[in-house]
Image (cartoon, rainbow, N blue to C red):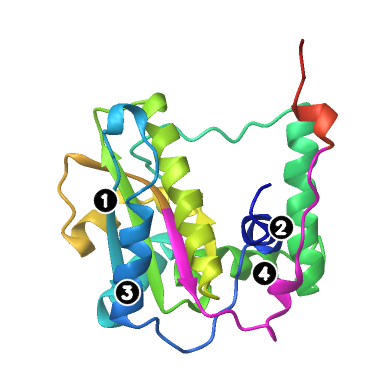
Amino acid sequence: MPSTVIKQLLKQRHSVRGFLNKEVTPELLEEIFSLAQHAVSNCNTQPWKTFVASANVKDNLKQNLIDTVMTGTKPDSDFQYYSDFKGEHQVRQIECAKALYNAMGVERGNKAERKQALLRNYEFFGAPHVAIICMPKSFEINNALDIGIYLQSLMLIMESFGIGSCAQGALSFYPQIIKDTLNIPESMGVLVGLSFGYEDKSQLANNARTSRAMLSDSVTFLS
């Protein structure tokens, strides 16, 4: 029988967009990221390179990103980012946005508040830590699958320790700012970010929940 703990972690994990002013200890950080090293990868290549920013380094990165976004600089990702969703995928995307903005009490036509909500991505939602997950620029989609497995492992491990997280594709939009600030080699491409820390349950955004598709919509059993 599958572990009750694993089932519980999968069901209770959610994107956290508001954090307490409380850092994760260095010892626990090392344990979390050491456990995530056991994530499976194609031919055991382990293509992830992760840079964890905290304290002043995290604050510098936040300010550099906000300054860049506020100037209207266009995103320039290291890897192609697809967002032109159609059909059922667009429906789910819209549902996700509605769930978040409704939880925050942001009206559809309130452009100022929506812009502020967007900027929160680059403030890491007030998280004390942010992990920038990279892979070599020469790698492609099959290697990105390994990064997804690693990312899911990280989030579930964090959840098991009572630490909330939010995976952020938006943190891949300005890779050069991130690489310059964190001294990441140019050969590395920024794929995704993960803001994390202890959840502030008083933050309205943390009440947002999304649904999941019916099993029959996603899985076909053949025999």
41 displayed left or right of 166: left
Residue 11's disc is 2
Residue 122 position in % (x across, y down): 46, 66
Q: Residue 26 versus residue 38: which sits nearer the camera?
A: 38
Cα–Cα gap, marks 1 and 3:
16 Å
Residue 27 position in % (x across, y down): 29, 79
Q: In the rendered structure, which amino acid carries the disc numbered 4?
A: Ala
Q: Nearer the viewer, mark 2 or mark 3?
A: 2
Q: Is residue 22 magenta?
A: no
Q: Nearer the viewer, mark 4 or mark 2?
A: 2
N-terminal-most mark, 2 or 3: 2
The residue pinned by badge 4 equals 112
N-terminal-most mark, 2 or 1: 2
Q: In the rendered structure, which amino acid carries the disc numbered 3?
A: Lys
In the displayed orientation, state which residue is furthest to the front: 1
- From this viewpoint, is residue 90 visible? yes
* Crowd around label 3: few <14 · some 14–19 · many ≥20 (10 Å): many
Q: In the rendered structure, which amino acid carries the disc numbered 2?
A: Lys
Residue found at x 77% / y 19%: 221
187 displayed left or right of 192: left
184 displayed left or right of 217: left
**Which segment is the magenta one?**
193-213
Residue 58's disc is 3
Where disc 1 sits, the SS reads helix
The residue pinned by badge 1 equals 176
> Which image quarter holds the C terminus?
top right
The answer to whether mark 4 and mark 3 are in CB contact below 8 A is no
Q: Nearer the viewer, mark 4 or mark 3?
A: 3
Q: Nearer the viewer, mark 1 or mark 3?
A: 3
Q: In the rendered structure, which amino acid carries the disc numbered 1?
A: Gln
Cα–Cα gap, marks 4 and 2:
33 Å
